[in-house]
Image: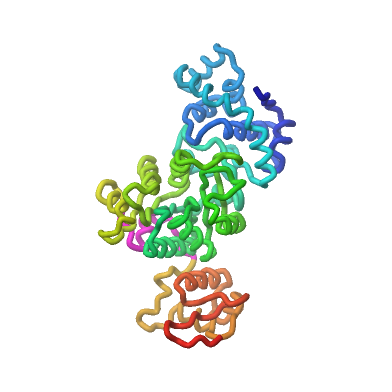
Amino acid sequence: MTEIELTAHRARRELGQMVGEASDDDMVISYARAVWSTLVEPGDGVAGALVAALGAPLALEVALSAGDRAIADAARAADLSLDALRAGRARWMPRIGAAPAALALSRRTGLHLLTPEDGRWPARAGVLGPHAPLCLWARGDVSLLGATAPAVALVGARAASSYGEQVASDLAAESAIAGVTVFSGAAYGIDGAAHSAALTAGGSTVAVMAGGLERTYPVGHIDLVERMARAGLVIAEMPCGTVPTKHRFLMRNRLIAAFSDATVVVEAGWRSGALNTANHALQIGRPLGVVPGPITSASSMGCHRLLRSSEAVCITGFSDVQELLGGMIAVTATAVGELTDADGRTDDRTRLLDAVGSRTGRATEDVARRAGFAVDEAAALLGLLELEGAVVRRGSGWVQAPRSGAATLW
């Protein structure tokens, strides 16, 4: 069996820059938690209870090398049956040899390691009790996890319809410009639409992955995940080298629900994995919203099932998401609905379009100056207009999109 040396020297060598500045004791704790993440499957309640009772280093010593007396004492301390702890050790022991390679790969990938002892740890994770992650591996802005800003999970079908993707994009964009962090799972369909719209609107978004962060799954979302690593955050509780499996996807969903103040299912078939996220939200007492679809649509059968059989709230627009979050939102920019020029009034949409112009590309700063907006506000609203199809990027500037049937001038 591979020897795990729980010393500050070994911890600093194994973790490198993944933890940053920390005391010797904190380094040892972080190292022990990192090793634990290589031993367990997501949500292992026996490991969680043992670590909570003894601390990660002592729990690891018990798990790997303790005698019968120490194991019995640890089981009593963690309020576990002796059989449960023995079964846990039988699960964990075969994996100990994989820890050094997983940590080395994490170092090469340039990840951050977050633990509950870190001030950036998400307090919302506490609702999971012993089933909370033992640590988190991250790429991007780790401050998003510990932030007090409201957060919403937008989830749904991978094989989404154009209706579902449009609704997800609108809700994500409006959430983003209202200062709400958008959580999802980086999958095709609803997840990808939500992440992309939040980024385009200049907001914060977090992707929770089911496997190691050294490679992106799905492969088709490599560019999207890279964008999130630069402007948002990508996290996983499993270390590098871990392959995403069906079980790990389902257990990943508990994190999406727990890290958010509310969950919204945008589109889901009868057996969609998004229903698993919804059930996790209900189990931990978080508000659940559901977007209805056409009654003939198989893509919305799961949504209608939730609306009939649970305490889910019907979501018909961003105002419903605001209610779901319980007044946590302090709107920081104009919402999409307020951009609509339905009655011909001179509103923010008109001001922006006038500033953009129809022929010459103009930089965001120029548009902001012409329209009388702050640059950040103009950037967010231009992103929404781009989603709407009212403006397009041309080189380094913005121009109005040609109207349907109108002659293109370039």
Task: Pinpoint residue 81: horizontal percent, then vertical percent.
Answer: 44, 19
Which residue is nearer to you in this view: 207 or 6?
207
Q: Position of residue 15 (x, y in %)?
A: 69, 38
- What colour-coding does the image apply? rainbow
Check the image and report above or below for 69 versus 51. Answer: above
Q: Which residues are magenta?
A: 313-332
Q: Is 290 left, or right, of 213 in this rendering?
A: left
Q: Nearer the viewer, residue 49 or 101?
A: 101
Q: Residue at x 68, y 38 (%)?
A: 104
Q: Residue at x 55, y 12 (%)?
A: 68
In the image, is residue 83 above or below residue 307?
above
On screen, 279 above or below 225? above
Q: Is residue 226 on the magenta stretch?
A: no
Rendered-image quadrant of the C terminus: bottom right
Q: Is residue 233 left or right of residue 350?
A: right
Residue 24 lies left or right of residue 340; in this view the side is right
Split into 4 quadrants, where in the image is the N terminus? top right
Instruction: Residue 112: tell me if it is visible.
Output: yes
Residue at the image point whose x is 62% and y is 76% from the top:
395
**Looking at the image, how many numbered discs can be counted on the residues?**
0
Q: Does 327 appear in magenta?
A: yes
Residue at the far top in the pictured view:
69
Q: Residue 270, how many percent across, how many down?
A: 31, 49
Q: Is residue 330 visible from the viewing direction of this image?
A: no
Q: Nearer the viewer, residue 169 or 121?
A: 169
Give percent across and percent down for residue 79. Answer: 46, 21
